[in-house]
Amino acid sequence: MKILVTGGAGYIGSACTEYLLNLGYDVTVFDSLMTGHRAAVDKRAEFVKGDLNCRDAIFDVIKKGKFDGIMHFAAFSLVGESMTNPGKYFSNNLGAGINLLDAAKEAKVKKFVFSSTCAVYGEPEHVPIGENEKTKPVSPYGESKLMFEKALEWYHRIHGMEFVALRYFNASGATGAFGEDHNPETHLIPLVLRVALGKLKNIKIFGDDYTTPDGTCIRDYIHILDLAQAHELALKKGKCGFFNLGTGSGYSVKQIIEMSRNVTGHSIPEEIIPRRPGDPPKLVARSAHAASELGWKPKHENIKDIISSAWEWIEKHPEGYGDN
């Protein structure tokens, strides 16, 4: 199968590209490199530098490529930034995504796999979170992802385009070749490991007075290789709809820090600062639907293994991909 991966120079897109290539897929990566890294694109993939906001460019690539499926990762994903610049998020995550959808429809692409997020649920009423939980985002980022999900559903109804939207929780870990390098970095595990590496003075904990066993927020961490497996399974004919991806287990901020100390052998100083607005105490996925319908089973659920893979990559790449 020929697959187009948009955002394939980013963290999750690069891992999924590598995974597909290892299984024998023919992969083309389309990325603007605005937030991605050229060095994160597997050398076996064809690379096209381009912006989804340029409608003619993506139409041309998809028409010539004759792709069997599209995996769409190209999105802005900083919740805080979306609260100060919502237009940027609706323009890119929805508007540019519509360009991609229209190009896929025009070329009669059979399958569309979308990298969605648990942010579509906002502050859920029930945990673990199932797909039947109300979708009520609390940020323009989450709203933009939900709006694109709705567009996918309408394109399916009207044009028959088969889609899978994967709503995942905290992507983490690294493959042997590709890891996490964001600027700015906002994710907990790479920030903690930067403290161990001596790049940061301490790790800041946003509140320790939540209704959790140790007072810090609990999140569901999922290895990017398990995410990649789910994306590949979603390409199968007949699979369509919305699926949560998570391990069903949660770890608190303090547990992540303590395990990182164990993995790295460094003390990792911490500092308690005030809560961030909108941080729910606990976000954990119920992924039974992905297990039963896609045949998905995470293979890297051990949090020590997840952190170890991230630490191994960051030790080899202390400056990330070196292009920040």
Image: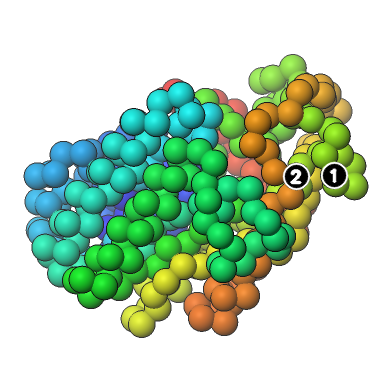
124 or 205, which is in the foreground?
124
The residue located at (25%, 65%) in the rendering is 155
39 or 219, which is in the foreground?
219
Q: Describe the element under mark 2 as helix, strand or loop.
A: loop
The residue located at (84%, 33%) in the rendering is 208
The residue located at (33%, 66%) in the rendering is 153
Q: Give the crowd class for mark 2: few <14, some 14-19, many >=20 residues within 10 Å.
A: some
Q: Are marks 1 and 2 in contact (CB under 8 Å)?
A: yes
Determine whether 59 is above or below 105 in the image: above
Q: Is residue 244 visible?
A: yes
Residue identified by numbered label 2: 281
Name of the residue lying farthest toward the top: 201
The answer to whether residue 247 is left or right of residue 97 is: right
Give, as a three-letter code, the residue at label 2: Pro
Q: Position of residue 203 (x, y in %)?
A: 75, 26
Q: What color scheme is it?
A: rainbow
The residue located at (58%, 48%) in the rendering is 122
Q: Earlier in the sequence, mark 1 or mark 2?
A: 1
323 or 247, which is in the foreground?
247
Q: Position of residue 139 (x, y in %)?
A: 50, 38
Name of the residue lying farthest toward the right: 213
Give, as a three-letter code, the residue at label 1: Thr
Residue identified by numbered label 1: 211
Q: Is residue 22 visible?
A: no
Determine whether 291 is above or below 227 in the image: below
Q: Describe the element under mark 1 as helix, strand or loop.
A: loop
